[in-house]
Image (spheres, rainbow, N blue to C red):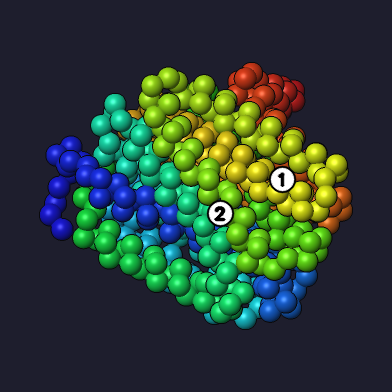
């Protein structure tokens, strides 16, 4: 691989497609378990509530990796970081496929989540290579790959696990990551670091970045709340379908096809953000998510078949809205501080996946105590909170921080 830099490198469509595929394969690793939780619970001899900790550990690992590892993209060659994480992710997936008990599976899922953060090294790399006038479009295209990875992973996982066993899901995933690694080694250019500060200073600078940029905080809080609703739905869907409708894991996974319709949101949101303002696009996405979850209240008036159709429409709607907001929020964040894109993106995505981890836990608890309607009320409330934050800014968080500071000073 020749030693080129992003300043002299022309971004071809084939490389954009490769980066989109890489983000999709990487982030898919976080979601393979969701439609097959009932199978995992039986095979690993654990309860539905305990098996729900598998996606929680994965999301926590991802948030931890984003916070501690992704900022390295500003200090080191992103190409080397991407290739290293590719190897680690492939190995982690193999380990998941070998798990014999719930404790081992949870640990392996945590490590997998950490290494799957290579998806969030690819996105800033694409933004860095793209010309400013088309950055939203390029980010949107790469994010289309990420969205398809999230949604189609559930389809593939559900079908493969039902036909051939859940372990093959992880083995095949490891193979896909290894293939991407080979292609990335041949095609990715080298990147010049934007800073030479120490790792400790790099992490400290994130705190200063968070304090100085209210737009970054607003985007992070809003996306975190949307992610909480998103994760609560997908974590509990398979268990609800199994117990209420007596449907198998392949059906739960097939819901990903409905949500895949939201894949068109990423490029559309990117183009709209380039032409208008990403702040407007983010608010629109939050409104769509809120309306979609609120529509589940109509299920009490419908037959069982009609309820399933409504769920499909809801999946299309909120997936579209979540991805619209994410692309808009990333466009906002990447434009705030060009020399600290990896750190700014790390803060945004950390909040996003902390929200997902919280959504997995709270969704499982709410499902056990109040049922599926309780989960939908929870998802509607959190997405409405994100919409309110987009309209009113971060004033609720600011007010809370001011109160806590006043108490500590006293």
Query: 100 or 142: which is nearer to us?
Result: 142
Taking the image as shown, residue 67 lies to the left or right of residue 182, namely right
Q: Position of residue 91 (x, y in %)?
A: 43, 72
Query: 260 or 31: which is nearer to us?
Result: 260
Q: Is residue 354 visible?
A: no
Residue tagged 1: 310
For disc 1, the neighbor class at 10 Å (few under 14, some 14 to 19, many from 20) is some
> Is residue 242 shown above or below 335?
below
Taking the image as shown, residue 13 lies to the left or right of residue 225, namely left
Taking the image as shown, residue 304 lies to the left or right of residue 357, namely right
Q: Quadrant of the N terminus?
A: bottom left
Q: Position of residue 333 (x, y in %)?
A: 44, 31
Mark 2 or mark 1, earlier in chain: 2
Residues at circles 2 and 1 in contact by the CB criterion of under 8 Å: no
Residue pictured at 22% horizontal, 56% vertical:
187
For disc 2, the neighbor class at 10 Å (few under 14, some 14 to 19, many from 20) is some
Q: Position of residue 183 (x, y in %)?
A: 26, 62
Q: What mark, if any, has residue 257 been given in the picture?
A: 2
Residue pictured at 82% horizontal, 45% vertical:
302
Query: 372 or 208: which is nearer to us?
Result: 372
Q: What mark, if any, has residue 152 been given in the picture?
A: none
Residue pictured at 44% horizontal, 33% vertical:
268
> Is residue 378 shown above or below 337?
below
> Is residue 280 shown above or below 63?
above
Q: Position of residue 166 (x, y in %)?
A: 58, 75
Q: Is residue 146 visible?
A: yes
- Residue 399 sits in quarter: top right
Q: Quadrant of the C terminus?
A: top right
Taking the image as shown, residue 79 lies to the left or right of residue 291, namely left
Residue pictured at 58% horizontal, 54% vertical:
256
- Residue 47 sits in quarter: bottom right
């Amino acid at each position: 691989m020749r030693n080129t830099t992003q300043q002299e490198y022309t971004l071809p469509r084939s490389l954009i497609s490769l980066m989109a595929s890489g983000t999709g394969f990487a982030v898919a690793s976080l979601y393979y378990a969701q439609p097959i939780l009932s199978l995992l619970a039986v095979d690993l001899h654990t309860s539905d509530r305990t098996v729900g900790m598998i996606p929680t550990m994965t999301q926590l690992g991802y948030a931890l990796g984003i916070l501690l590892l992704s900022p390295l993209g500003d200090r080191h060659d992103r190409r080397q970081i991407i290739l290293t994480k590719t190897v680690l992710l492939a190995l982690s997936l193999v380990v998941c496929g070998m798990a014999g008990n719930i404790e081992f599976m949870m640990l392996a899922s945590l490590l997998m989540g950490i290494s799957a953060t290579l998806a969030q090294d690819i996105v800033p790399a694409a933004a860095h290579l793209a010309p400013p006038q088309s950055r939203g479009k390029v980010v949107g295209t790469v994010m289309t790959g990420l969205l398809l990875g999230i949604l189609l992973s559930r389809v593939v996982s559900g079908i493969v696990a039902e036909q051939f066993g859940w372990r093959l899901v992880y083995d095949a995933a490891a193979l896909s990551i290894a293939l991407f690694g080979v292609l990335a080694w041949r095609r990715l250019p080298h990147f010049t670091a934007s800073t030479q500060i120490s790792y400790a200073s790099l992490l400290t600078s994130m705190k200063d970045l968070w304090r100085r940029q209210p737009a970054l905080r607003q985007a992070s809080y809003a996306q975190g709340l949307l992610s909480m609703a998103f994760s609560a739905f997908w974590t509990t869907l398979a268990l609800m379908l199994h117990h209420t409708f007596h449907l198998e894991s392949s059906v739960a996974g097939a819901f990903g096809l409905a949500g895949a319709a939201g894949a068109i949101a990423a490029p559309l949101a990117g183009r709209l953000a380039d032409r208008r303002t990403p702040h407007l696009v983010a608010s629109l996405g939050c409104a769509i998510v809120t309306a979609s979850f609120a529509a589940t209240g109509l299920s009490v008036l419908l037959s069982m078949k009609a309820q399933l159709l409504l769920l499909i429409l809801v999946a299309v709607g909120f997936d579209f809205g979540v991805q619209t907001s994410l692309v808009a929020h990333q466009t906002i964040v990447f434009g705030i501080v060009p020399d600290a894109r990896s750190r700014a993106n790390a803060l945004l995505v950390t909040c996003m996946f902390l929200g997902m981890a919280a959504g997995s836990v709270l969704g499982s608890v709410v499902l056990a105590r109040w049922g599926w309607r309780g989960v939908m009320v929870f998802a509607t409330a959190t997405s409405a909170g994100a919409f309110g934050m987009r309209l009113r800014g971060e004033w609720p968080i600011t007010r809370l921080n001011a109160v806590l500071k006043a108490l500590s000073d006293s």
